[in-house]
Amino acid sequence: MIAKVASKKAPKQGMLENVMRQFDNAADIIELNTNIRKILEVTNNEIVVHFPVRMDNGEVEIFTGYRVQHNNSLGPYKGGLRYHPTVDIDAAKALAMWMTWKTSLAGLPYGGAKGGIQLDPNKYSDSELERITRRFTYALGDNIGPELDIPAPDVNTNPQTMAWILDTYMSTKSPAERSTNMHVVTGKPIGAGGSKGRDRATGFGVFLTIKFWAESNNVDLKDKKFIVQGFGNVGYWAAYFLVNEGAILTAVQDAYGSIVNEEGINVDELLNYTKGNKGSILGYAKARTLDNADFFSLDCDICIPAALGNQITAKNASKIKAYLIAEGANGPTDVDAEEILLKKGIDIIPDILCNSGGVIGSYFEWLQNRNGEIWSLEEVMEKLEKKMRESFTTVLETSKKRNVDMRTAAFVIAIERLEEAYVQRGIFP
């Protein structure tokens, strides 16, 4: 589920401006090769498709879909597809760039891509969403592929969406080729070639980075209060694992509003409530409703923005009382807000590290499909924790060595790896 507060208020190009400022900051620190900088600050391909779909009432509606491929110097493009009214070319460019840094930081053989369709999925039936998804897949054609560009779920898309894309894409291939294209998307249902653990990978990764941060700062998570913005897949699983560690969930915000209970909110009870309440947390009996504008100013130890970009801004950053922000969403904190937070001594686990569990989980699924293997849940979770710990440790060490914040350290590592690839391979021709 997504957060209601920011999508209309944020400037359209806010995320793109943020990612460019973050990139420029890190590039200046490492004195990035000028020619490589020119390559990395632009996208490789920007695909926009307009396609017709027949609605349940017989009328035809035209939709606009996007797929931006930023860089593939380390491997095939990788990134989610989101269905949301704010999807446009600039948002896709920003998110694709973040994916490049994220996959590089995680040490994965992937580049960055992102895309989606500009729509509000709540306004369409399941059968309409299926036709929209299949027609979008067909319109993208050979611009995606298991060794070229591998989509995954994102905001308002899920395993079912990926199954429709998989089936449509495979149906365009000859019968002999179809089974070799199973890894064209990740985040699929288990029965359609998905991986155990992929559903919780992003949220588990968010939890792990908080756990690693706590260990490195000698903080006990037991009885620590945390708030979560966004109670979809990422927000739910992050909260689930934190509560299991003894932390207390005190407030949640979703697309419909905010609720709070200082004594604690039962994560599974709330999830079950939303399933019978059209996805909304509002009306949950064991918490009171809170004004959206007051959410980030709540008294807590940890804040997890796991919804959309540009949620924490210069307007609300000074009100934040948490001493740790773990970015479950992509680009939830704008650059101006980050300056305020860092001056206040608040630590930020950056999105390209914090929520990278999702793309790592996708990589594991891609590998299993590619090799004809099936891993157990325990195997997936164990490998995911090991990979996340390696990334976190490297970021923390770089942060201390260069005397910079964690986001800058993460960007430095990611960009240096890309620079090394270009230096070693050269530039064609």
Image (tube, rainbow, N blue to C red):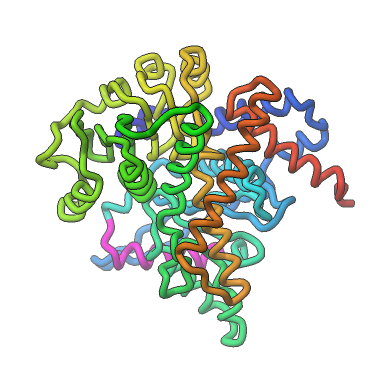
Choose between 330 and 223: the one closer to the eye.
223
| Furthest residue toward bottom | 176
Percent coordinates x, y for residue 365 in the rendering: 54, 64
Residue 126: image quadrant is bottom left
Q: Is residue 71 above or below residue 332?
A: below
Left or right of residue 310, residue 263 in this image: left
Q: Is residue 294 above or below residue 19?
A: above
Percent coordinates x, y for residue 157 in the rendering: 39, 56
Choose between 388 and 199: the one closer to the eye.
388
Point 55% across, 33% down: residue: 16
Percent coordinates x, y for residue 208 in the rendering: 47, 43
Choose between 347 and 11: the one closer to the eye.
347
Q: Is residue 130 above or below residue 170?
A: above
Point 39% across, 47% down: residue: 234
| Furthest residue toward right | 429
Left or right of residue 361, residue 416 in this image: right
Point 51% across, 37% down: residue: 212
The magenta-colored residue range is 124-140
Q: Main secondary structure of the magenta part?
A: helix
Point 27% across, 36% down: residue: 249
Left or right of residue 69, residue 222 in this image: left
